[in-house]
Amino acid sequence: MDPAVPIPDPPREYRLFRRRLLVALLVGGLMVGAVVIRLIALQLLDHRHFDALARGNRIRTLPIDPPRGLITDRHGIILAENIPSYELVINRDEVQNLHRTIRRIRAIVPLRPEDLRLFWQLVRVEPPYEPVPIRRDLSSRAAARLAVNLPSLPGVSIEAHLKRFYPLGPIAAHLLGYVGPIHSRELRQNPGRLYNAGSDIGQEGLELSYENLLYGIPGRRTVEINVGGGLVRVLRTRPPVPGDSLILTIDARLEAIAHAALGQNAGAVVAIDPKTGGILAMASTPSYNPNRFVNGISNADYARLADNPLRPLFNRALQGEYAPASTIKPFISLAVLNDRVITPETTIYCPGTFVLPGTTHVYHDWQPWGHGVTDLRKAITQSVDVFFYHMAVDLGIRRLDTFVRQFGFGRSPPIDLIGARAGVLPSPAWKLAHTGKPWYEGDTVISGIGEGFWLVTPLQMATALATLATHGHRFRPRVLHAILDPMNHRIDRMAPEAETPIRLDAPGLWSIVIRDMESVIKNPTGTAHGIDYGLRYPLAAKTGTAQVSNLDRNDFGNYHLLPKDERDNAIFIAFGPIPHPRIAVAVFVEHGVAGALTGAPIARRLIDADLSSLGLPPERQPYASLADPAPPATRR
Amino acid sequence: MAHWEGLQRASDVASRIALPISDASARDRDSGSFGPGWTGYLHLDGILLSELALLSLFGLVSLYGAGHGHFTLVEKQLIRVLLGFAVLVAVAQVPPVYYRLAAPWFYAASLLLLTAVLVYGHTRLGAQRWLDLGFVRLEPTELMLLALPLMLTRHLSAAPPPPDWKRIGASLILIGLPLALILKQPDLGSALLIGLIGVFCLFLSGIRWRYLVIGLLLVAASTPVAWHFMHQYQRERILIFLNPERDPLGAGYHIIQSQIALGSGGLFGRGLLHGSQTQLDFLPESTTDFIFAVIGEQFGLLGAFALIFLFLLLVQRTLWLATRMDARFGRLWTVTLAFIIFLYLVVNVGMVSGLLPVVGEPLPFISFGGSSIVTLMAGFGSIMNLSREPRLTHSR
């Protein structure tokens, strides 16, 4: 060890430290100076040079929109496809004066105010180097007129691309939805930079629900361009990955028949395959032409649709909430049988009115003179209101509620479409939460015939009916049958998703109610006997007529005296053929007077079309593009 | 010598324990921070803390711009920043004696990790730098950038200056071990940084000028030898630095594109999310090493200057704290940390602006990445704590 151990001398040490720090600061200052000078040189002195490099003669990546997946029905009939179309695009980096350029374009082709509004909107959010469309869907004449003028319009170009087309127009419009140009708001969120200005994006229905499958992955083309914006050469291309095609469980023929059968009425039809949960048809009228939306609907057109009192844009099948009226009776019958409130042999005398013990309010039957002695069979066949007033009161709202909830009432169905509503399953808790008033016994009475607070959607009703038809086996309702990958033509089938089945104490109860529903059509006194003529297979059905206006009692005979919007809603549910049901239908017709009158014929047409063409009673025929047959039916 | 060391440590401890309360409040007034409030209570420095927070915020905004306006990176980085601040506060609560005691362990652990990275590390861009620990990807080089100066500071502050040749020799070994391991990865940039930090430590500890000059001459003489041992891509980088147009679409691409980005930004910049170089992905590594080009493109010269100014403020405050310290160790360590920040800044900005070769060093607090932010925050925690050490004298 060094003999001369240095003796600490803090002041001297500190002076040394200060000196060294000073030297370091000097060197550091020089370094910062060099960096600062360099930055000034780059960013101030050579700014023009680098700016030109960044803007001008350089490499650019252009997006290539992926072709959107097709949508077909179960037999391969195309419901949504892509057809070529031309659009006018402005590349602002190469335009001297945007307003002058637009004026010159307007001299050649007319531009709608909506086009310009969307254009300026996109201009605000898009960086200057991104091309922005100004007019979509040019006619070939307009495209040609512009094409000859393009040399005098630098920065303006015509681009061919694919646009969405719905060949069936208003048929299944609500189900399919539509695509439209992406909004600036959506573009800003733009997950993963998938979309570009002018990309189409699903706005409603299936196009919205399955946007992630249908859209695909955009490609990129890296090109070298010169100062004028002209293409010098393509350096590399990453092709887009087309979106997946969807094969639906929908039968386009049934869909068209449902649409036609509803005719001028406002209403909805939902047909479902009880053994898979697959939706066969889902129609809502009045409808609209989705093709108008594809290139951005004009304000006038949109106002016409939005202001129509019949609300054509509203999807009644998913979102229309109606009182189920008498169509709820089969479900209540199951409840009372299961809870042993009655047996199938129990009879009740129906004088035509019902009064709660200890009160004075009179509840009427639809038939003023009553039905006399009534058992369950007769109660369902003739839709005896008084019988079900008794049932509801004897069962109590709580038990009624718990039992019927199992069929999916009061919650939105787990369908693969966005926007299905939940309806209302009346309960004391619900009433207190939504009206602030306690539950009265009278509320229970009218709940027994599906009036009062009850609200169901057509989809809910069809799903519940399908559950009844399969003796409690429940399947998640769905529209998507299979996904077709266009790259390798592989088909990915969606297996039916079974949910926990409803179990009754005695399995035989299902058949009892179903047989009673059969006599709604078969029995000459049945409310829907009118559609029995020529029926070649056993159907189970139930009619329903929901009061709309506050009239004291139904007055079918004189409905033509009432203004249209005070007539009752018509509801009709049916499924068949009975031993092995293949289709369950719920029909809702607004102001259709009576379920038997307007609803039943629509259901008959639909079921006839589905069953008769196939021949009875084999399995459903193979799906169009699939080799294997439909999944094996649920056992009885 | 051991005797001296022991005595000094004892006196440090004694003075810390025997601190009169009135003296503590005097020190708080003296250090010019927010006074004896919560920062004083937590051994923190309010000004330094706000400068760090401001820098981190600047970094998050830049990441938002570099990440095409998505919050994914920003969110991840925010978590790291918050973790960093937590570590900072935690480190500031440790009695300062432990920094010196922990130094050898920290150094040894970093050395071990550096060895591990050579064995198990993940290769990225031709170099093994990452250690995947399952939950976090660790870059041991970042740890070493703090562990080495800490160890050196401890070693060099054990005796009064100037260090004798034995002490210098031991220091050179301390520097040489990690240097060799990092060169083996190979990571030329970090190795140079480590070397520079080591030399700076020696310089600040009062090494005689003649040793310094001899050392520099030796390094200059060995450059051709080093060239011989360099990897092809490292040679390429240096050649590209000398002439970027050698390969405009290949190795020179980084420098050209980042200069275009900076240059096209001009005085005021092209605006957040409106820089074509960044948004069209012309700028490589825009969220990490080249994030300064993103700032220059989007916020222009003013934005770039603002960031540099913020960094210099940070360095200034750190140095100011160092001049208020009595203990040799604390002083040396604090100035070295300021130097590390400064070096990172100059090397990164120099690289992005084409003043230096592309060495692949991040911009601390701004670049996306966790290891550097957490280790540096720990360093700042320690110096804040050291700055709260009692002063022995007030007159100088």
Image (spheres, rainbow, N blue to C red):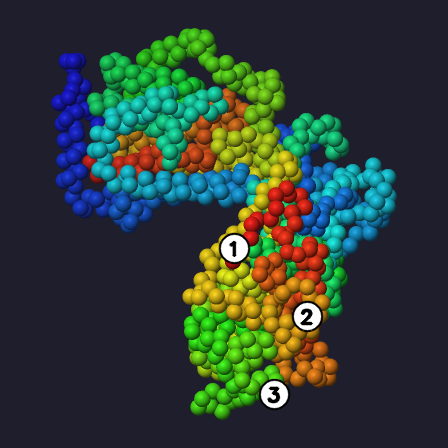
Q: Where on the picture, by quarter, is residue A372?
A: bottom right
Q: In the image shown, does B163 or A64 lie closer to the viewer?
A: A64
The lab-note entry on whether marks 3 and 1 share a chain reads: yes
Q: Using residue A584 as the reference point, say whether residue A25 is left or right of it.
A: left
CA distance for labels 2 and 3: 26 Å
Sequence-first tag of 3 and 1: 3
Residue at the image point whose x is 67% and y is 68% from the top: A267
Where A168 falls versus B323 (above or below)?
below
Q: Is mark 1 on a helix, strand or loop?
A: loop
**Pointer 3 indicates a residue of which chain?**
A
Label 1 packing within 10 angstroms: few (<14), some (14-19), many (20+)? few
Find disc 2 in the rendering and name its residue. A532
Residue A48 rendering spot, x and y as whole percentages: 66, 32
Q: In the rendered structure, which amino acid carries the disc numbered 1?
A: Arg
Find disc 1 in the rendering and name its residue. A635
In contact (CB < 8 Å): disc 3 and disc 1: no
- Does residue B103 show up? yes
